[in-house]
């Protein structure tokens, strides 16, 4: 393989698979709230709700 | 929506959404699009498209489904009375795509077996259209049935409808939780097997050598947006439907990022595997890689059989490849059919069994009558083109313009997601959806309309293109508008308003 191809392959892998790893880490650090009660504030109708 | 009809947790939702996003297009379309679009340089427009259109649109549809808790038409109806037809348009697109998408999976099922027996001999192309599909080449519908496609197609539909009858969690989510890990394992073995062949690195060289000049071409940018758009399954109504079945307090944007990057991660893996195999083929035939590059049906059912016959131990590679297509295809098919079933369930107050039997059954019948026939291939080709380029792109365009410019509801939707989700949406998200995506989708839509009017499609007779191309594309819009005038069962639309104001759990 040419050097430019190797470099671009590594960049593509690092960006996309790195993005996936970062997204997974981000998700693990932000677990969903445990509380089963629905807070009223999460789903307020917006302006113009019909 | 009963309890049975909810995803148990966010990982179930993520798997189901990954199953939907990772489909045939990841395996057979991305490698070719990347190669044609500047090779290694394609990563630039590809990531730009992902970040400026793919992920923003994904979040928008999640927000619609999650906030309004309904199928695509019901969610749009609750959002605003006049937008219900957009939801039905998406349902129609999903109906049309599902009936032919299932057919390709049926072919792939047969090719798992053919990989071992190598029935195509020296002529994979002649075998595919001739002995296997028995195509007459006529531009019509009907003709004789082809048993070799009909039987696996029937089995695919039975399997799909059984999964859907089992519901969102026990059917769709559990299927994806099994199939997606198996797919990844099988596909990784396929990639390793392909990389071990002589010439594999030549293939990777062809795929990743950057052609920076390509980035000056608007076509390359449009194809990057197109790839992201089709591959993430964004405007089919799937993401609205799935998000409606996710618990209220779910981190949707954080989950969406995982789905989007895993979809792209799989595409990169597919690019490596497919081009390693193509590199081997070029090496064995003594030609440059560019001469063996193919996409779509030509790649899977003509180029790959040739590779399988040429490669020592090719049967294993073939089984892995076609099994991957089947697994990736079925998890996507299930999601597409769910859009339609869910919509009719809501609108006509049907139970799950009734909707799966009647609506899903109708889709299966349409699919089985039209496609496993001696004229099925041409029909599949034209319907695929029009459903994607007019249906998906058109419905995506109309939704962003309606929400961003007409009703100005995007800020409201971002507020909904931000209340729980960890990845916060800000003004950047609004700019992407009000400026970038309408421009890109508008350009794609208009240039496709102009091309099709000027050039027709694929050298097909204009009457055929008129009926099965334009007719289907325009018919879907007309049917969508008609369905949006059918009254809802009493209380269905209002039920959500009550929930929103009382904050009740469902």
Image (cartoon, rainbow, N blue to C red):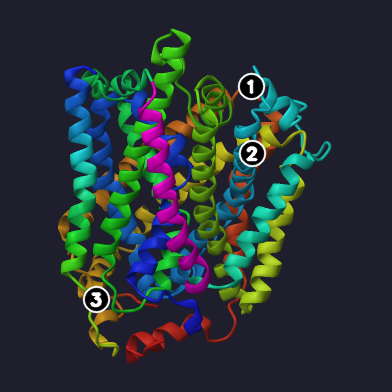
Magenta region: which residues? Answer: B169-197
In the rendered image, which quarter is residue B253 located in?
bottom left
**Residue drawn where x is 21% and y is 73% of the image:** A31
Confirm whether circles 2 and 1 share one chain.
yes
B240 vs B181: above or below: below
Q: Which mark is residue B218?
A: none
Mark found first going from the N terminus, 2 or 1: 2
- Is residue B273 among what the camera can see? yes
Q: Which residue is mark 1?
A: B125
Viewer-nearest residue: B105 or B393: B105
Give percent across and percent down for residue B247.
36, 78
Circle 3 Cα neighbour tier, 10 Å, few/some/many (<14 / 14–19 / ≥20): some
Q: Chain of mark 1?
A: B
Please state which of the two labelled residues, at mark 2 or mark 1, is closer to the viewer. Answer: 2
Please state which of the two labelled residues, at mark 3 or mark 2, is closer to the viewer. Answer: 2
Circle 2 SS class: helix
Q: Which mark is residue B113?
A: 2
């Amino acid at each position: 393989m040419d050097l430019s191809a190797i470099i671009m392959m590594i960049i593509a892998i690092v960006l996309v698979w790195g993005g996936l790893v970062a997204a997974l880490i981000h998700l693990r650090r932000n677990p969903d709230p445990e509380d089963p009660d629905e807070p009223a504030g999460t789903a307020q109708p917006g302006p113009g709700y019909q | 929506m009963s309890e049975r009809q909810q995803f148990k947790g966010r990982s179930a939702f993520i798997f189901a959404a990954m199953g939907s996003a990772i489909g045939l297009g990841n395996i057979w379309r991305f490698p070719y699009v990347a190669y044609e679009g500047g090779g290694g340089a394609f990563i630039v427009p590809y990531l730009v498209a992902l970040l400026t259109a793919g992920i923003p649109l994904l979040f928008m549809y999640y927000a619609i489904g999650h906030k309004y808790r309904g199928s695509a038409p019901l969610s749009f109806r609750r959002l605003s009375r006049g937008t219900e037809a957009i939801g039905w348009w998406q349902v129609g697109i999903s109906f049309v795509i599902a009936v032919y998408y299932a057919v390709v999976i049926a072919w792939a099922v047969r090719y798992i077996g053919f990989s071992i027996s190598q029935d195509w001999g020296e002529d994979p192309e002649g075998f595919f259209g001739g002995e296997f599909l028995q195509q007459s080449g006529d531009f019509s519908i009907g003709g004789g049935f082809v048993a070799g496609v009909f039987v696996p197609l029937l089995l695919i539909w039975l399997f799909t409808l059984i999964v859907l009858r089992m519901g969102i969690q026990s059917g769709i989510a559990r299927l994806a939780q099994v199939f997606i890990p198996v797919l990844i394992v099988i596909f990784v073995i396929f990639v390793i097997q392909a990389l071990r062949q002589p010439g594999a690195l030549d293939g990777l060289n062809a795929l990743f050598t950057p052609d920076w000049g390509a980035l000056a071409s608007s076509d390359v940018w449009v194809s990057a947006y197109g790839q992201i758009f089709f591959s993430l399954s964004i405007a089919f109504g799937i993401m609205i439907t799935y998000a409606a079945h996710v618990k209220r307090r779910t981190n949707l944007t954080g989950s969406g990022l995982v789905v989007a990057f895993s979809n792209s991660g799989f595409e990169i893996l597919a690019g490596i595997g497919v081009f390693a195999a193509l590199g081997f083929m070029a090496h064995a035939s003594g030609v440059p890689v560019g001469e063996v590059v193919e996409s779509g049906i030509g790649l899977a059912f003509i180029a790959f059989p040739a590779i399988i016959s040429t490669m020592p131990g090719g049967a294993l590679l073939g089984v892995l490849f076609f099994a991957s297509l089947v697994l990736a295809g079925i998890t996507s098919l299930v999601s597409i059919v769910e859009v339609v079933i869910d919509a009719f369930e809501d609108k006509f107050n049907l139970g799950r069994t009734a909707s799966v039997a009647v609506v899903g059954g109708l889709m299966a019948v349409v699919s089985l009558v039209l496609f496993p026939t001696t004229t099925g291939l041409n029909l599949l080709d034209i319907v695929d083109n029009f459903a994607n380029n007019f249906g998906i792109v058109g419905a995506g365009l109309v939704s962003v313009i309606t929400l961003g410019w007409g009703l100005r509801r995007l800020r409201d939707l971002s507020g909904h997601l931000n209340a729980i989700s960890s990845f916060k949406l800000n003004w950047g998200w609004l700019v992407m959806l009000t400026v970038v995506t309408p421009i890109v989708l508008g350009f794609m839509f208009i240039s496709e309309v102009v091309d099709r009017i000027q050039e027709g499609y694929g050298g097909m007779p204009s009457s055929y293109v008129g009926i099965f191309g334009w007719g289907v594309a325009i018919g879907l819009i007309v049917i969508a508008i008609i369905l949006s005038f059918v009254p809802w069962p009493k209380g269905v639309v209002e039920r959500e308003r009550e929930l929103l104001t009382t904050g009740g759990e469902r």
